[in-house]
């Protein structure tokens, strides 16, 4: 087969496609096909899957850190409130509470 191709040169600047490559006045030197689209898609899918897996792992770490921080903040706030209630220093602003309940139920003006 190399004998048939001897002397025939491929032009590296010509686009590669699935058509027969022909030089004017010469016999075809062979078929050239594009990279299999399925292989390309599989490789791209693999990259996408890796990126998604990395994103999920990052999100899971952020969620775990957030939960740990919230748990410690909530515990500290809860202890503070317990002390205020037991000592009689905790007072509820009834008007502020009513406003908050109405804002939550009806939607505040800031919600648009």
Image (tube, helix red, strand yellow):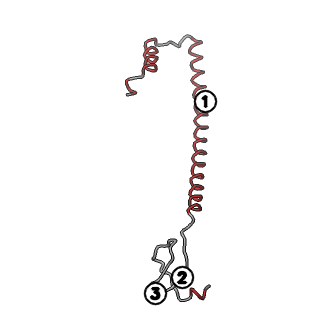
Labels 1 and 2 touching (C-beta < 8 A)? no
**Disc 3 residue crowd, few under 14, some 14–19, many 20+, Cα 10 Å:** few
Pick the front one: 33 or 80: 33
Q: Secondary structure at mark 2?
A: loop
Q: Is residue 102 above or below residue 75?
A: above
Q: Which mark is residue 29?
A: 2
Marks 3, 1: nearer the viewer: 3
Quarter of the C terminus within the rendering: top left
How far apart marks 2 and 3 lie (CA) works out to 12 Å
Q: Callout 1: helix, strand or loop?
A: helix
| Residue 106 picture location, percent across and down | 42, 19
- Is tag 1's residue or tag 2's residue first in the polypeptide sequence? 2
Residue 73 point in image, percent of width and height = 57, 28
- Which mark is drawn over residue 25? 3
Which circle's residue, 3 or 1, is located before the other in the chain? 3
Q: Name the residue tied to disc 1.
A: 71
Q: Is residue 87 above or below residue 2?
A: above
Q: Residue 27, percent across and down?
A: 51, 85
Q: Are marks 3 and 1 in contact (CB under 8 Å)?
A: no
For the point 59% across and 58% down, the residue is 42
Q: Between 63 and 78, which is closer to the camera in this rendering?
A: 63
Q: Position of residue 65 (x, y in %)?
A: 60, 38
Residue lying at 37% horizontally and 24% vertically, measured from the top left: 109
In the drawing, what numbered circle is on residue 89? none
Q: Nearer the viewer, residue 44 or 71?
A: 44
């Amino acid at each position: 087969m190399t004998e048939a191709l001897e002397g025939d040169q491929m032009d590296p600047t010509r686009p590669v496609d699935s058509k027969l490559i022909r030089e004017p006045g010469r016999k075809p030197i062979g078929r050239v096909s594009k990279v299999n689209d399925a292989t390309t898609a599989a490789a791209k899918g693999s990259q996408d899957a890796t990126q998604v897996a990395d994103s999920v792992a990052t999100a899971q770490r952020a969620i775990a850190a957030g939960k740990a921080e919230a748990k410690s903040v909530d515990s500290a706030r809860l202890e503070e409130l317990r002390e205020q209630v037991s000592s009689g220093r905790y007072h509820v602003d009834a008007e502020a509470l009513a406003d908050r309940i109405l804002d939550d139920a009806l939607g505040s003006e800031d919600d648009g």
